[in-house]
Each structure stands twice: as C-alpha cells, then as structure tokens.
Amino acid sequence: MGQLVVIVAMFALLWLLLIRPQAKRKLAQQRLLSSVEVGDEILTAGGLYGHVRALGDADELEVEIAPGTQVRIARRAVAAVIPPDDESEAIEGELVEEESPDAAEATTPADANRG
C-alpha cells in the first residue's frame, strides 16, 4: 500500500512539473497563432522580422521582410507578435526631453582643463 502511494505521488509530481506547464505553453502558442492579423509585425522562429501582408489558407501567411520582398511562411513558424511602437516612441520622446537638460549642464574635457 505504501508503494502505491509513492507511485501516485510521483505521477502527480511529474504531471505538475512537466505535463501541465507544457499544456499551458501549447495553449498560449495556439492563441498567439490565431491572433495574427494583416499588418501585424511578427518574429519568426528563424529570427526574421516582418509584417503580415496576407493571410493564406489556414496554415500560411505572406510576410514582407524587406520593402518589396514577400515570403510565404507556415503559420506555426511565428514565434512572437511584436506590439506596435506607438507607446514606445512616446516613452522615448519623454526620455530624450529628460536627458536634454543634463546634456546642457555637462562639461566637455576642454572645460575641465580650464578650471
């Protein structure tokens, strides 16, 4: 009876540590692939960045990887959908404004030698 409890406990531990997280990753990947739309910027599993230009049949996408260069890829090759840069540009603009006064106060090596 004690051995049965140990075997059941080991199976439960195996399920918690290996099988359940893998199922969650698979579900997240399926959601990602189903959310891809025309105009999205994507990263492929091969490391190519591009913009989705057309949705082919259920398993294909047309992706523009350079101006005038379109490739057809399998939908499962999409590793990530890159979020739009609208918010990033606004944040970068704020950072530049914050850095500008510091840059004006900075001294050059020539100024340091005069002092």
Image: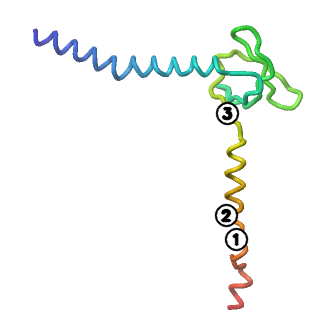
SS category of the residue bearing label 1: helix
The structure's colour scheme is rainbow
Assess whether mark 1 and mark 2 are in contact (beta carbons under 8 angstroms): yes
Which of the image's four quarters has the N terminus?
A: top left
Q: Residue at x 49, y 22 (%)?
A: 25
- What amino acid is labelled 2 in the image? Glu
Q: CA distance from mark 2 to mark 1?
A: 7 Å
Residue 71 image position (x, y, % from top left): 80, 20
Q: Residue at x 51, y 17 (%)?
A: 27
Q: Give above or below for 45 relative to 2.
A: below
Q: Earlier in the sequence, mark 1 or mark 3?
A: 3
Q: CA distance from mark 1 to mark 3?
A: 33 Å
Q: CA distance from mark 3 to mark 2?
A: 27 Å
Q: How many marks?
A: 3
**Residue occupied by mark 2:** 98
- What amino acid is labelled 1 in the image? Pro
Q: Give above or below for 13 relative to 4.
A: below
Q: Residue at x 72, y 67 (%)?
A: 100
SS category of the residue bearing label 2: helix
Q: Which disc number belongs to residue 82?
A: 3
Which of the image's four quarters has the C terminus?
A: bottom right
Nearest to the observer: residue 91 or residue 64: 91
**Residue 77: which quarter of the image?**
top right
**Residue occupied by mark 1:** 101
